[in-house]
Amino acid sequence: MQQKERLIQLLEQQLAHSNKQNNELAKKLEQSLKQIEVLTEQVRQLTKALYGSKSEKSKYRAPDGQISLFEDEDDPFFNESEHTEEQSTETICYTVTRKKTNKKRNDSFRGDIEIEEIHHHPENIICDCCHGEMVEFSSVLVREEAKFIPATMKRVQHFEHVYECKTCKKDNLQKAQIKRGKAPQGAIQRSIAGPTVLAKLIYDKFIQYLPLYRQVKEWERYGLLTNDKNLSNWVIRVSEDWLQPLYDLMKQQLMKKSVLHIDETYSKIIKRSDGKAPQSNAYNWVCRSVQSEGPIIVLFKSALSRGRAILEDLIKDFKGTVICDGYSAYNQLPNVKFANCWAHVRRYWLKVDSKNGRIGVEYCDRLFHIERKIKHLSPEKRVQIRQKEAKPIIDEFFDWIDRSPFFGKNAIAKAAEYTLSRKEELKVFLDNGNVAIDNNPAENAIRPNVIGRKNWLFSFSEAGAKANAICLSLAETAKANGIDFYRYLVKLMTDLPNLPIHQQPEILHDYLPWSENIQATCAK
Protein backbone atom coordinates (compact mmCIF):
# COMPACT_ATOMS: atom_id res chain seq x y z
CA MET A 1 0.00 0.00 0.00
CA GLN A 2 2.82 2.37 0.89
CA GLN A 3 4.62 1.50 -2.34
CA LYS A 4 1.45 2.29 -4.32
CA GLU A 5 1.05 5.71 -2.60
CA ARG A 6 4.73 6.48 -3.25
CA LEU A 7 4.27 5.61 -6.94
CA ILE A 8 1.21 7.90 -7.14
CA GLN A 9 3.20 10.67 -5.44
CA LEU A 10 6.06 10.31 -7.95
CA LEU A 11 3.60 10.39 -10.84
CA GLU A 12 2.00 13.56 -9.44
CA GLN A 13 5.43 15.20 -9.07
CA GLN A 14 6.34 14.26 -12.63
CA LEU A 15 2.98 15.58 -13.85
CA ALA A 16 3.47 18.86 -11.96
CA HIS A 17 6.99 19.17 -13.35
CA SER A 18 5.67 18.49 -16.84
CA ASN A 19 2.92 21.10 -16.39
CA LYS A 20 5.52 23.62 -15.20
CA GLN A 21 7.71 22.88 -18.21
CA ASN A 22 4.69 23.17 -20.49
CA ASN A 23 3.77 26.54 -18.96
CA GLU A 24 7.34 27.79 -19.39
CA LEU A 25 7.41 26.57 -22.98
CA ALA A 26 4.02 28.19 -23.61
CA LYS A 27 5.34 31.50 -22.26
CA LYS A 28 8.48 31.25 -24.40
CA LEU A 29 6.33 30.38 -27.40
CA GLU A 30 4.10 33.38 -26.73
CA GLN A 31 7.16 35.63 -26.40
CA SER A 32 8.62 34.20 -29.59
CA LEU A 33 5.36 34.76 -31.46
CA LYS A 34 5.25 38.37 -30.25
CA GLN A 35 8.86 38.86 -31.28
CA ILE A 36 8.13 37.33 -34.68
CA GLU A 37 5.16 39.68 -35.03
CA VAL A 38 7.30 42.71 -34.16
CA LEU A 39 10.09 41.64 -36.51
CA THR A 40 7.61 40.86 -39.29
CA GLU A 41 6.10 44.33 -38.87
CA GLN A 42 9.56 45.91 -38.93
CA VAL A 43 10.42 44.04 -42.14
CA ARG A 44 7.12 45.20 -43.65
CA GLN A 45 7.82 48.82 -42.65
CA LEU A 46 11.39 48.72 -43.97
CA THR A 47 10.22 47.16 -47.22
CA LYS A 48 7.57 49.87 -47.54
CA ALA A 49 10.15 52.57 -46.77
CA LEU A 50 12.57 51.13 -49.33
CA TYR A 51 10.21 50.27 -52.17
CA GLY A 52 6.89 51.93 -51.33
CA SER A 53 5.56 55.43 -51.91
CA LYS A 54 7.42 58.19 -50.05
CA SER A 55 4.34 60.40 -49.98
CA GLU A 56 2.10 60.88 -46.94
CA LYS A 57 -0.99 61.25 -49.11
CA SER A 58 -4.02 59.19 -48.16
CA LYS A 59 -7.27 58.14 -49.79
CA TYR A 60 -9.47 59.94 -47.25
CA ARG A 61 -12.45 61.87 -48.57
CA ALA A 62 -14.46 64.25 -46.48
CA PRO A 63 -18.20 63.61 -45.97
CA ASP A 64 -19.02 66.38 -48.48
CA GLY A 65 -16.91 64.64 -51.12
CA GLN A 66 -14.00 67.09 -50.95
CA ILE A 67 -10.54 65.54 -51.24
CA SER A 68 -8.27 65.49 -48.20
CA LEU A 69 -5.40 67.91 -47.71
CA PHE A 70 -3.10 64.95 -48.33
CA GLU A 71 -4.57 63.75 -51.65
CA ASP A 72 -3.91 64.80 -55.23
CA GLU A 73 -6.73 65.42 -57.65
CA ASP A 74 -7.97 62.40 -59.58
CA ASP A 75 -6.12 61.72 -62.80
CA PRO A 76 -8.67 61.97 -65.65
CA PHE A 77 -6.82 59.19 -67.43
CA PHE A 78 -8.15 56.69 -64.90
CA ASN A 79 -11.76 57.86 -65.17
CA GLU A 80 -12.28 56.03 -68.45
CA SER A 81 -13.84 52.57 -68.31
CA GLU A 82 -11.46 49.66 -68.69
CA HIS A 83 -11.50 47.82 -72.05
CA THR A 84 -12.29 44.12 -71.68
CA GLU A 85 -10.72 41.36 -73.76
CA GLU A 86 -13.98 40.93 -75.71
CA GLN A 87 -14.07 44.62 -76.57
CA SER A 88 -10.45 44.63 -77.70
CA THR A 89 -11.13 41.98 -80.40
CA GLU A 90 -13.58 44.24 -82.26
CA THR A 91 -12.39 46.50 -85.07
CA ILE A 92 -14.12 49.85 -84.97
CA CYS A 93 -13.70 52.40 -87.77
CA TYR A 94 -14.48 56.03 -87.05
CA THR A 95 -13.39 59.52 -88.00
CA VAL A 96 -12.12 61.90 -85.36
CA THR A 97 -12.64 65.62 -85.80
CA ARG A 98 -10.11 67.35 -83.61
CA LYS A 99 -10.94 70.78 -82.28
CA LYS A 100 -7.99 73.11 -82.66
CA THR A 101 -6.89 74.31 -79.25
CA ASN A 102 -4.13 76.64 -78.18
CA LYS A 103 -1.78 74.43 -76.24
CA LYS A 104 -0.60 76.11 -73.06
CA ARG A 105 3.15 76.61 -73.04
CA ASN A 106 5.17 75.57 -70.03
CA ASP A 107 7.83 78.17 -70.81
CA SER A 108 7.42 81.90 -71.29
CA PHE A 109 8.95 85.31 -70.71
CA ARG A 110 8.36 87.64 -67.80
CA GLY A 111 6.51 90.79 -68.82
CA ASP A 112 9.39 93.22 -68.25
CA ILE A 113 11.97 91.39 -70.42
CA GLU A 114 13.51 93.67 -73.07
CA ILE A 115 12.51 92.81 -76.64
CA GLU A 116 15.05 92.69 -79.45
CA GLU A 117 13.61 92.51 -82.95
CA ILE A 118 15.49 90.94 -85.85
CA HIS A 119 13.97 91.55 -89.29
CA HIS A 120 14.72 89.25 -92.18
CA HIS A 121 14.25 90.68 -95.69
CA PRO A 122 14.61 88.83 -99.00
CA GLU A 123 18.09 89.04 -100.45
CA ASN A 124 16.66 90.25 -103.76
CA ILE A 125 13.48 92.40 -103.98
CA ILE A 126 13.48 92.67 -107.81
CA CYS A 127 10.46 91.01 -109.41
CA ASP A 128 11.44 87.97 -111.46
CA CYS A 129 8.60 88.73 -113.89
CA CYS A 130 8.68 92.47 -114.73
CA HIS A 131 12.03 93.26 -113.08
CA GLY A 132 10.48 96.11 -111.07
CA GLU A 133 11.21 96.84 -107.38
CA MET A 134 8.85 95.00 -105.02
CA VAL A 135 6.99 96.73 -102.12
CA GLU A 136 6.57 95.24 -98.61
CA PHE A 137 2.96 94.64 -97.67
CA SER A 138 3.24 92.61 -94.38
CA SER A 139 5.54 91.04 -91.82
CA VAL A 140 5.03 87.80 -89.92
CA LEU A 141 6.36 86.88 -86.46
CA VAL A 142 7.51 83.30 -87.02
CA ARG A 143 9.20 82.51 -83.70
CA GLU A 144 10.59 83.86 -80.45
CA GLU A 145 13.77 82.73 -78.78
CA ALA A 146 15.51 83.45 -75.50
CA LYS A 147 18.89 85.16 -75.70
CA PHE A 148 21.23 84.97 -72.72
CA ILE A 149 23.80 87.73 -72.20
CA PRO A 150 26.44 86.50 -69.72
CA ALA A 151 27.34 88.67 -66.75
CA THR A 152 30.43 90.83 -67.15
CA MET A 153 33.06 91.77 -64.60
CA LYS A 154 34.18 95.39 -64.35
CA ARG A 155 37.18 96.75 -62.49
CA VAL A 156 35.79 99.86 -60.82
CA GLN A 157 38.38 102.36 -59.56
CA HIS A 158 37.34 105.14 -57.15
CA PHE A 159 39.34 108.38 -57.37
CA GLU A 160 38.97 111.21 -54.85
CA HIS A 161 39.72 114.55 -56.50
CA VAL A 162 41.33 117.35 -54.46
CA TYR A 163 40.72 121.05 -55.13
CA GLU A 164 42.44 124.14 -53.75
CA CYS A 165 41.82 127.89 -54.03
CA LYS A 166 44.62 129.49 -56.07
CA THR A 167 43.55 133.03 -55.12
CA CYS A 168 43.91 132.45 -51.36
CA LYS A 169 47.17 130.64 -51.93
CA LYS A 170 48.56 133.50 -54.06
CA ASP A 171 47.57 136.34 -51.72
CA ASN A 172 48.88 134.48 -48.65
CA LEU A 173 46.16 136.24 -46.69
CA GLN A 174 44.95 133.03 -45.15
CA LYS A 175 45.46 129.33 -45.38
CA ALA A 176 44.53 128.01 -48.82
CA GLN A 177 41.13 126.27 -48.94
CA ILE A 178 41.28 122.58 -49.92
CA LYS A 179 38.32 120.38 -50.71
CA ARG A 180 38.40 116.66 -51.48
CA GLY A 181 35.76 114.39 -52.95
CA LYS A 182 34.52 111.59 -50.72
CA ALA A 183 34.25 108.07 -52.09
CA PRO A 184 31.61 105.82 -50.48
CA GLN A 185 32.84 103.29 -47.95
CA GLY A 186 33.16 99.69 -49.10
CA ALA A 187 31.44 96.84 -47.29
CA ILE A 188 34.84 95.30 -46.51
CA GLN A 189 37.84 97.57 -46.03
CA ARG A 190 40.90 96.88 -48.20
CA SER A 191 38.99 94.31 -50.26
CA ILE A 192 38.12 94.28 -53.94
CA ALA A 193 34.70 92.75 -53.21
CA GLY A 194 32.01 95.30 -54.10
CA PRO A 195 28.31 95.21 -53.14
CA THR A 196 27.20 93.29 -56.24
CA VAL A 197 29.95 90.66 -55.86
CA LEU A 198 29.10 90.12 -52.19
CA ALA A 199 25.39 89.95 -52.99
CA LYS A 200 25.88 87.34 -55.72
CA LEU A 201 28.26 85.36 -53.52
CA ILE A 202 25.70 85.10 -50.68
CA TYR A 203 22.74 84.66 -53.04
CA ASP A 204 24.40 81.77 -54.90
CA LYS A 205 25.23 79.98 -51.67
CA PHE A 206 21.96 80.40 -49.75
CA ILE A 207 19.40 80.53 -52.57
CA GLN A 208 21.12 78.49 -55.29
CA TYR A 209 22.87 76.26 -52.68
CA LEU A 210 26.18 76.56 -54.55
CA PRO A 211 29.20 75.81 -52.30
CA LEU A 212 31.99 78.38 -52.18
CA TYR A 213 34.62 76.08 -53.65
CA ARG A 214 32.42 75.61 -56.73
CA GLN A 215 31.84 79.35 -57.03
CA VAL A 216 35.59 79.94 -57.37
CA LYS A 217 35.66 78.61 -60.96
CA GLU A 218 32.60 80.64 -61.88
CA TRP A 219 34.21 83.84 -60.59
CA GLU A 220 37.38 82.96 -62.50
CA ARG A 221 35.32 82.63 -65.69
CA TYR A 222 34.02 86.16 -65.12
CA GLY A 223 37.57 87.45 -64.56
CA LEU A 224 37.82 87.59 -60.74
CA LEU A 225 40.72 85.48 -59.46
CA THR A 226 40.15 84.35 -55.88
CA ASN A 227 39.87 81.20 -53.72
CA ASP A 228 37.31 79.60 -51.42
CA LYS A 229 39.09 80.85 -48.27
CA ASN A 230 38.68 84.44 -49.48
CA LEU A 231 35.02 83.87 -50.29
CA SER A 232 34.42 82.35 -46.85
CA ASN A 233 36.09 85.30 -45.14
CA TRP A 234 33.95 87.72 -47.16
CA VAL A 235 30.74 86.00 -46.04
CA ILE A 236 31.85 86.01 -42.39
CA ARG A 237 32.95 89.68 -42.45
CA VAL A 238 29.76 90.87 -44.12
CA SER A 239 27.62 88.85 -41.70
CA GLU A 240 29.41 90.21 -38.63
CA ASP A 241 29.58 93.86 -39.74
CA TRP A 242 26.31 94.51 -41.59
CA LEU A 243 23.88 91.59 -41.35
CA GLN A 244 24.27 90.82 -37.63
CA PRO A 245 22.62 94.13 -36.53
CA LEU A 246 19.59 93.34 -38.71
CA TYR A 247 19.56 89.76 -37.39
CA ASP A 248 19.53 91.04 -33.77
CA LEU A 249 16.71 93.46 -34.55
CA MET A 250 14.70 90.68 -36.20
CA LYS A 251 15.17 88.54 -33.08
CA GLN A 252 13.88 91.36 -30.87
CA GLN A 253 10.79 91.63 -33.06
CA LEU A 254 10.34 87.85 -33.07
CA MET A 255 10.40 87.59 -29.27
CA LYS A 256 7.45 90.01 -29.08
CA LYS A 257 5.19 87.51 -30.88
CA SER A 258 2.79 85.26 -28.97
CA VAL A 259 3.16 82.13 -31.15
CA LEU A 260 6.30 80.58 -32.62
CA HIS A 261 7.11 77.52 -34.72
CA ILE A 262 10.41 75.89 -33.67
CA ASP A 263 12.37 73.00 -35.16
CA GLU A 264 15.99 71.83 -35.37
CA THR A 265 18.21 69.77 -37.67
CA TYR A 266 21.77 68.53 -37.51
CA SER A 267 24.83 70.02 -39.23
CA LYS A 268 28.62 69.56 -39.16
CA ILE A 269 31.33 71.89 -37.82
CA ILE A 270 34.96 70.85 -38.29
CA LYS A 271 36.74 73.06 -35.71
CA ARG A 272 34.64 72.78 -32.54
CA SER A 273 35.34 74.63 -29.29
CA ASP A 274 33.92 71.81 -27.14
CA GLY A 275 36.68 69.37 -28.11
CA LYS A 276 34.36 66.88 -29.80
CA ALA A 277 35.30 65.16 -33.03
CA PRO A 278 34.37 66.85 -36.33
CA GLN A 279 32.04 63.91 -37.05
CA SER A 280 29.89 64.89 -34.04
CA ASN A 281 26.58 66.52 -34.83
CA ALA A 282 26.10 70.24 -34.42
CA TYR A 283 22.61 71.71 -34.86
CA ASN A 284 20.73 74.51 -36.57
CA TRP A 285 17.59 75.70 -34.80
CA VAL A 286 14.88 77.68 -36.55
CA CYS A 287 12.11 79.93 -35.19
CA ARG A 288 9.28 81.18 -37.40
CA SER A 289 6.43 83.54 -36.62
CA VAL A 290 2.85 82.97 -37.80
CA GLN A 291 1.09 84.83 -40.61
CA SER A 292 -1.72 86.11 -38.41
CA GLU A 293 0.72 88.12 -36.25
CA GLY A 294 2.19 90.38 -38.91
CA PRO A 295 5.19 90.03 -41.25
CA ILE A 296 6.80 86.59 -41.25
CA ILE A 297 10.17 86.39 -39.46
CA VAL A 298 12.41 83.33 -39.85
CA LEU A 299 15.42 83.09 -37.55
CA PHE A 300 18.18 80.46 -37.53
CA LYS A 301 20.61 79.78 -34.70
CA SER A 302 23.73 77.61 -34.95
CA ALA A 303 24.65 75.54 -31.87
CA LEU A 304 27.01 72.72 -30.97
CA SER A 305 24.27 70.64 -29.33
CA ARG A 306 20.60 69.92 -29.22
CA GLY A 307 20.42 70.48 -25.48
CA ARG A 308 17.69 72.22 -23.55
CA ALA A 309 20.04 75.10 -22.66
CA ILE A 310 20.18 76.09 -26.35
CA LEU A 311 16.38 76.31 -26.51
CA GLU A 312 16.27 78.34 -23.28
CA ASP A 313 18.78 80.83 -24.69
CA LEU A 314 17.00 80.98 -28.04
CA ILE A 315 13.63 82.02 -26.56
CA LYS A 316 14.67 83.47 -23.19
CA ASP A 317 12.64 86.67 -23.76
CA PHE A 318 9.62 84.96 -25.30
CA LYS A 319 6.23 84.60 -23.61
CA GLY A 320 3.60 82.61 -25.43
CA THR A 321 3.00 79.32 -27.26
CA VAL A 322 5.63 77.25 -29.06
CA ILE A 323 4.50 74.81 -31.76
CA CYS A 324 6.99 71.93 -31.94
CA ASP A 325 7.48 68.20 -32.35
CA GLY A 326 7.71 65.66 -29.51
CA TYR A 327 11.40 66.19 -28.64
CA SER A 328 11.88 66.09 -24.85
CA ALA A 329 13.65 69.49 -24.68
CA TYR A 330 10.32 71.13 -25.53
CA ASN A 331 8.89 70.87 -22.05
CA GLN A 332 8.27 73.05 -18.99
CA LEU A 333 9.84 76.42 -19.68
CA PRO A 334 8.68 79.47 -17.72
CA ASN A 335 6.09 81.62 -19.52
CA VAL A 336 5.95 79.12 -22.41
CA LYS A 337 3.14 76.75 -23.41
CA PHE A 338 3.97 73.96 -25.84
CA ALA A 339 1.64 72.80 -28.62
CA ASN A 340 2.48 69.54 -30.37
CA CYS A 341 2.21 68.73 -34.05
CA TRP A 342 -0.60 66.58 -35.49
CA ALA A 343 1.43 65.88 -38.63
CA HIS A 344 3.91 63.93 -36.46
CA VAL A 345 1.01 61.98 -34.91
CA ARG A 346 -0.28 61.14 -38.36
CA ARG A 347 3.16 59.88 -39.46
CA TYR A 348 3.23 57.42 -36.56
CA TRP A 349 -0.18 56.00 -37.52
CA LEU A 350 0.82 55.98 -41.18
CA LYS A 351 3.58 53.49 -40.30
CA VAL A 352 1.01 51.03 -38.94
CA ASP A 353 0.17 48.72 -41.83
CA SER A 354 -3.19 47.50 -40.54
CA LYS A 355 -6.85 48.41 -40.25
CA ASN A 356 -6.27 50.19 -36.93
CA GLY A 357 -3.45 52.19 -38.50
CA ARG A 358 -5.77 53.35 -41.26
CA ILE A 359 -8.39 54.32 -38.67
CA GLY A 360 -5.81 56.47 -36.84
CA VAL A 361 -4.77 58.17 -40.09
CA GLU A 362 -8.41 58.83 -40.96
CA TYR A 363 -8.99 60.61 -37.62
CA CYS A 364 -6.02 62.88 -38.39
CA ASP A 365 -7.20 63.49 -41.95
CA ARG A 366 -10.59 64.64 -40.69
CA LEU A 367 -8.84 67.26 -38.53
CA PHE A 368 -6.67 68.45 -41.41
CA HIS A 369 -9.74 68.70 -43.63
CA ILE A 370 -11.31 71.13 -41.13
CA GLU A 371 -8.09 73.18 -41.02
CA ARG A 372 -8.06 73.39 -44.79
CA LYS A 373 -11.53 74.93 -44.76
CA ILE A 374 -10.78 77.56 -42.09
CA LYS A 375 -7.20 78.60 -42.93
CA HIS A 376 -8.31 81.96 -44.40
CA LEU A 377 -10.61 82.87 -41.49
CA SER A 378 -9.80 85.11 -38.52
CA PRO A 379 -8.25 83.52 -35.39
CA GLU A 380 -11.49 84.05 -33.45
CA LYS A 381 -13.59 82.33 -36.12
CA ARG A 382 -11.10 79.45 -36.32
CA VAL A 383 -11.47 78.80 -32.58
CA GLN A 384 -15.27 78.66 -32.89
CA ILE A 385 -15.17 76.09 -35.70
CA ARG A 386 -12.44 74.05 -34.01
CA GLN A 387 -14.47 73.81 -30.81
CA LYS A 388 -17.57 72.81 -32.74
CA GLU A 389 -16.09 70.38 -35.30
CA ALA A 390 -12.53 69.38 -34.34
CA LYS A 391 -12.90 68.90 -30.58
CA PRO A 392 -15.48 66.04 -30.85
CA ILE A 393 -13.20 64.23 -33.34
CA ILE A 394 -10.19 64.53 -31.01
CA ASP A 395 -12.20 63.32 -27.99
CA GLU A 396 -13.47 60.37 -30.03
CA PHE A 397 -9.93 59.61 -31.23
CA PHE A 398 -8.44 59.51 -27.73
CA ASP A 399 -11.39 57.48 -26.42
CA TRP A 400 -10.85 54.94 -29.23
CA ILE A 401 -7.16 54.60 -28.30
CA ASP A 402 -8.01 54.21 -24.58
CA ARG A 403 -10.49 51.41 -25.31
CA SER A 404 -8.17 49.55 -27.70
CA PRO A 405 -5.62 47.04 -26.34
CA PHE A 406 -2.46 48.48 -27.95
CA PHE A 407 0.46 46.97 -26.01
CA GLY A 408 4.01 45.90 -26.77
CA LYS A 409 6.76 47.31 -28.94
CA ASN A 410 5.07 47.14 -32.32
CA ALA A 411 4.26 50.14 -34.51
CA ILE A 412 0.66 50.52 -33.38
CA ALA A 413 1.66 50.49 -29.70
CA LYS A 414 4.28 53.18 -30.40
CA ALA A 415 1.70 55.27 -32.27
CA ALA A 416 -0.80 54.95 -29.43
CA GLU A 417 1.82 55.78 -26.79
CA TYR A 418 3.11 58.80 -28.76
CA THR A 419 -0.43 60.16 -29.17
CA LEU A 420 -1.60 59.62 -25.58
CA SER A 421 1.58 60.97 -23.99
CA ARG A 422 1.01 64.32 -25.74
CA LYS A 423 -2.71 64.53 -25.19
CA GLU A 424 -2.81 68.00 -23.62
CA GLU A 425 -0.23 69.53 -25.97
CA LEU A 426 -2.18 68.23 -28.99
CA LYS A 427 -5.32 70.03 -27.78
CA VAL A 428 -3.72 73.48 -27.40
CA PHE A 429 -4.63 74.59 -30.93
CA LEU A 430 -8.36 74.20 -30.11
CA ASP A 431 -8.29 77.27 -27.83
CA ASN A 432 -5.94 79.56 -29.79
CA GLY A 433 -6.70 80.60 -33.36
CA ASN A 434 -3.11 81.71 -33.97
CA VAL A 435 -1.78 78.21 -33.21
CA ALA A 436 -1.51 75.92 -36.23
CA ILE A 437 -2.47 72.24 -36.14
CA ASP A 438 1.03 71.21 -37.23
CA ASN A 439 4.64 72.37 -37.25
CA ASN A 440 5.01 72.18 -41.04
CA PRO A 441 5.88 75.90 -41.42
CA ALA A 442 9.02 75.35 -39.28
CA GLU A 443 9.91 72.18 -41.20
CA ASN A 444 9.49 74.04 -44.49
CA ALA A 445 11.59 76.94 -43.19
CA ILE A 446 14.43 74.60 -42.21
CA ARG A 447 14.38 72.73 -45.54
CA PRO A 448 16.77 75.17 -47.32
CA ASN A 449 19.31 74.47 -44.59
CA VAL A 450 18.93 70.73 -45.22
CA ILE A 451 19.27 71.16 -49.00
CA GLY A 452 22.30 73.40 -48.54
CA ARG A 453 23.87 70.94 -46.13
CA LYS A 454 23.86 68.29 -48.86
CA ASN A 455 25.89 70.64 -51.06
CA TRP A 456 28.29 72.48 -48.80
CA LEU A 457 28.46 69.49 -46.37
CA PHE A 458 29.93 71.31 -43.35
CA SER A 459 31.13 74.58 -41.84
CA PHE A 460 34.84 74.78 -41.14
CA SER A 461 34.51 77.00 -38.06
CA GLU A 462 31.86 78.11 -35.60
CA ALA A 463 32.16 81.63 -37.03
CA GLY A 464 31.27 80.23 -40.44
CA ALA A 465 28.30 78.32 -39.01
CA LYS A 466 27.07 81.51 -37.29
CA ALA A 467 27.43 83.45 -40.56
CA ASN A 468 25.41 80.71 -42.31
CA ALA A 469 22.63 81.09 -39.74
CA ILE A 470 22.53 84.88 -40.18
CA CYS A 471 22.47 84.70 -43.99
CA LEU A 472 19.81 81.97 -43.99
CA SER A 473 17.68 84.05 -41.60
CA LEU A 474 17.72 87.08 -43.91
CA ALA A 475 17.26 84.93 -47.03
CA GLU A 476 14.19 83.07 -45.74
CA THR A 477 12.65 86.18 -44.16
CA ALA A 478 13.14 88.09 -47.42
CA LYS A 479 11.48 85.28 -49.41
CA ALA A 480 8.58 85.10 -46.94
CA ASN A 481 7.97 88.85 -47.40
CA GLY A 482 8.16 88.86 -51.21
CA ILE A 483 11.62 90.42 -51.47
CA ASP A 484 14.22 89.71 -54.18
CA PHE A 485 17.09 88.58 -51.96
CA TYR A 486 19.84 89.56 -54.42
CA ARG A 487 18.56 93.13 -54.84
CA TYR A 488 18.06 93.32 -51.09
CA LEU A 489 21.68 92.33 -50.44
CA VAL A 490 23.00 94.87 -52.99
CA LYS A 491 21.07 97.62 -51.21
CA LEU A 492 22.31 96.53 -47.78
CA MET A 493 25.94 96.30 -48.92
CA THR A 494 25.68 99.71 -50.61
CA ASP A 495 23.79 101.70 -47.96
CA LEU A 496 24.71 100.30 -44.53
CA PRO A 497 28.51 100.91 -44.69
CA ASN A 498 27.75 104.61 -45.25
CA LEU A 499 25.13 105.04 -42.51
CA PRO A 500 25.71 105.58 -38.74
CA ILE A 501 23.81 102.41 -37.82
CA HIS A 502 25.80 101.82 -34.62
CA GLN A 503 25.24 105.36 -33.32
CA GLN A 504 21.63 105.49 -34.58
CA PRO A 505 20.33 101.88 -34.57
CA GLU A 506 16.78 103.06 -35.32
CA ILE A 507 17.94 103.47 -38.95
CA LEU A 508 17.92 99.67 -39.25
CA HIS A 509 14.12 99.58 -39.04
CA ASP A 510 14.06 101.02 -42.57
CA TYR A 511 16.11 98.03 -43.81
CA LEU A 512 14.01 95.17 -42.45
CA PRO A 513 12.52 93.05 -45.28
CA TRP A 514 8.95 94.21 -44.57
CA SER A 515 9.76 97.96 -44.26
CA GLU A 516 8.31 100.44 -46.77
CA ASN A 517 11.82 101.32 -47.96
CA ILE A 518 12.74 97.73 -48.85
CA GLN A 519 9.29 96.84 -50.19
CA ALA A 520 9.46 99.83 -52.54
CA THR A 521 12.97 99.10 -53.86
CA CYS A 522 13.49 95.32 -53.62
CA ALA A 523 10.07 93.67 -54.04
CA LYS A 524 9.89 90.92 -56.64
Image (cartoon, rainbow, N blue to C red):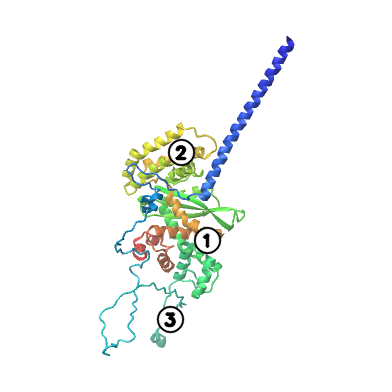
Residue lying furthest front = 90
Q: Label 1, on which residue?
A: 455
Give neighbour class at mark 2: few <14, some 14-19, many 20+ (Cα, 10 Å): few
In the rendered image, the quadrant that contains the C terminus is bottom left
Q: Label 2, on which residue?
A: 355
Residue 257's x, y, as percent? 39, 49
- Local secondary structure at mark 1: helix
Mark closest to the chain's N terminus, 3 or 1: 3
Please name the amino acid that badge 2 sits on: Lys
Residue 267's x, y, as percent? 54, 55
Q: Label 3, on which residue?
A: 162
Mark identifier at residue 214: none
Give neighbour class at mark 3: few <14, some 14-19, many 20+ (Cα, 10 Å): few
Please name the amino acid that badge 3 sits on: Val
Residue 205's x, y, as percent? 49, 63
- Local secondary structure at mark 2: helix
In the rendered image, the quadrant that contains the N terminus is top right
- From the image, state whether disc 2 or disc 1 is nearer to you: 2
- Local secondary structure at mark 3: strand
Residue lying furthest bottom = 131
Q: In the figure, residue 480 lies in which quadrant?
A: bottom left
